Amino acid sequence: MSDEKIIKSADRVKNHGEVFTPKRVVDLMLDQPEITAKINDLHATFLEPSAGEGAFLTELLKRKLKVAAKQSKTASAFNTNALVALSTLYGIEYLEDNVEMLVMNMMMTFTQTYSRITVDDFKGRVNDHVLKSAQVIIRANMAQGDTLKGITDTGAPIVFSEWQAVNGQPSKVRRMEYTFESILNQSGPTGTVQHSSQQLDLFAGTEDFDDAKQEDDISLPQYALCKWTDIYKQELE
Ligand SMILES: C[S@@+](CC[C@H](N)C(=O)[O-])C[C@H]1O[C@@H](n2cnc3c(N)ncnc32)[C@H](O)[C@@H]1O
């Protein structure tokens, strides 16, 4: 990605349609007014259904972190808002080596951009709990799997976490897990996978599909309400 190599091999292009998008095309697409409006909404979610090594997701992350900074008055508020911004970005990628690069690129982008803004703009200190929580969010939101079938390479369903804001408690978050299939089934266009980087209100009307979740055969962990910066502890109820 960084050296703008857009194909790895002819076989991979043939078998998986693997062609990476150059940065200038990513910028052109994300500069579209409808996309910019969603980037400026800190809570709007994005799903990249064929994420590759994260050409779109890493650029979205940089842009969303700038929005998070603008909406923060202090370094402490930015710690929370940076994690809120990160939590809205989701990706699915089929090939294991690409997923590894995707996770690494997201973590590197978050660490560099969060640290630079914290130190330069807020004259603050990089918070280790933020970085550790970011790692948990990225691992949860970047899934290996087949988007069309909704399953991973072991045949298990793809599972995503929703990071729910808590009314009146901006520093708190509730993590809920849903299978990708249940997310797609709960609504029409908002849950439909369309083009790369299309903005999706992934978890619209979640109260309605808490029931759908109950119907799933797999049992998903129930996470305790916690501070955004304590996500890394992954405490259960
Ligand atoms: C055209 S590339 C685009 C990658 C990235 N979006 C970019 O713009 O650089 C398509 C990617 O989708 C992945 N892919 C192909 N079929 C898939 C599927 N059914 N589910 C998830 N990912 C898939 C490929 O491995 C490849 O990395």
Image (cartoon, rainbow, N blue to C red):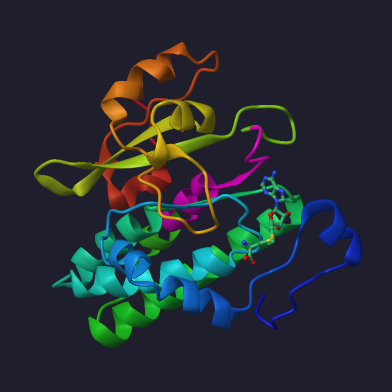
In which quadrant will I find the C terminus?
top left
- Residue 17 in view in this figure: yes
- Quadrant of residue 39 in the image? bottom left
52 horizontally vs 142: left or right: right
185 is higher (above) or lower (below) than 44: above
Give the quadrant of ligand 1: bottom right
**Which residues, given as a range, are shown in magenta?**
133-149
Report the side of 148 relative to 185 (left or right).
Answer: right
Q: Is residue 108 above or below residue 229?
A: below
Q: How many marks?
A: 0
Query: Looking at the image, which residue sits at the far left?
Result: 168
Q: Quadrant of the N terminus?
A: bottom right
Residue 181 screen position, x and y as percent: 53, 28
Identified at 39% across, 72% down, the residue is 32
Q: Residue at x 27, y 60 (%)?
A: 42
Q: Position of residue 104 (x, y in %)?
A: 61, 64
147 in the magenta segment: yes
Mark yes or no: residue 234 visible.
Answer: no
Which residue is painted at 30% across and 77% down in the image?
Answer: 118
Residue 30, placed above or below residue 229: below
Q: Quadrant of residue 158?
A: top right
* Apparent side of residue 7 relative to residue 4 in the rendered image (left or right): right
| Viewer-nearest residue: 50 or 75 | 50
Q: Residue at x 31, y 31 (%)?
A: 224
Q: Residue furthest bottom?
A: 120
Query: Observer-nearest residue: 32 or 162?
Result: 32
- Is residue 188 highlighted in magenta? no
Give percent across and percent down for residue 220.
48, 23
Q: Position of residue 49 (x, y in %)?
A: 57, 49
Residue 217 drawn above or below residue 236: above
